[in-house]
Image (cartoon, helix red, strand yellow):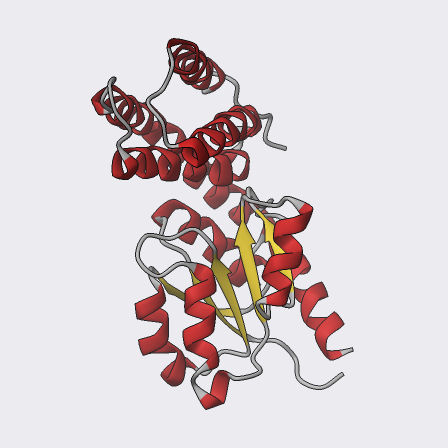
Amino acid sequence: MADNLTRILYVEDEPDIQMVARLALEALGGFTVEICSSGDEALQRAPGFKPQLFLLDVMMPGMDGPSTLKMLRALPQFANTPVIFMTAKVQPGEVAGYKELGAVDVIPKPFDPMTLASRVQDIWERCHG
Amino acid sequence: MADPNELQVTLKILCNAYAAQLPEKLKQLEQVWEQLPLDSWDEEGFQTLHRMVHSLTGSGKTFGFALLSDVARNLEEHLKQLAQAKTTLSVQQRSHIHELMSELHRVTLHRDEVS
């Protein structure tokens, strides 16, 4: 396997989900997590944080997940960084659409805080296996 | 990595905080719904309503309210269909939304068992 996953940038506008995701990914998963409340904030903070993986909520006010992905891809250092969408919209057709946009996978919401970290780890290993 | 018991305690605190905010969230949802005009299509108001319901769908089960997520998803599906038509809501459509909103209230009383 190439690199171990340690640094994750998560873009999510809802404070309660931010808190539970931080708990799940940091305390349970042992990852270092940077949480941004909007796509704009992610674009500002990603270059300094240098994430190995992005978790993007799809439905956000302002710039949504897919638009954020497009803007991140325009930055050379994140042209190939894996992106996972988090969304409560998980019709099979929609998942295929997100993958076409360049997401490696989609994690459905509501997620289980006890298994979120292992789910992210599994997807990472699949990308780097 | 954190102590599993400590983790459970923290998770419980977050779930309790979510539970405490639920009545206010549902109240806001109802206010947005009641402010939608009866005689025309209000795109912005409807989008706000959709976003609020979507937020409940995507969070309920994470915080121990699985039924809330289920009912919110039904309501969201219904709203999505209406948003495609963008026409003034019929009496039946309004009453269906009203029913699902009442159900949202009922299911906030059902909290999942935490292990």
| Residue A74 image point, x, y percent | 44, 83
**Residue A108 vs residue B56: left or right?**
right
**Quadrant location of the N terminus of chain A in the rendered image:** bottom right
- Out of A8 and B17, give the one closest to the viewer: A8
Picture quadrant where residue A3 is located: bottom right
| Residue B112 image point, x, y percent | 58, 26
- Out of A111 and A68, give the one closest to the viewer: A68
Can residue B39 be seen at all in this image of the molecule? yes
Residue at x-position 28% and y-position 22%? B27
Count of labels shown?
A: 0
- Out of A57 and A49, give the one closest to the viewer: A57
> Where A101 falls versus B90 (above or below)?
below
Question: Residue lying furthest bottom in this view?
Answer: A76
| Residue A56 image point, x, y percent | 48, 61
> Where B30 falls versus A39 (above or below)?
above
Residue at x-position 71% and y-position 74%? A127
**Residue A34 vs residue A4: left or right?**
left
**Residue A62 vs residue A29: left or right?**
left
**Quadrant location of the C terminus of chain A in the rendered image:** bottom right
Can residue B56 be seen at all in this image of the molecule? no
Residue at x-position 65% and y-position 68%? A104
- Out of B29 and A92, give the one closest to the viewer: A92
Picture quadrant where residue A4 is located: bottom right
> Where A120 falls versus B71 (above or below)?
below
| Residue B12 image point, x, y percent | 48, 37
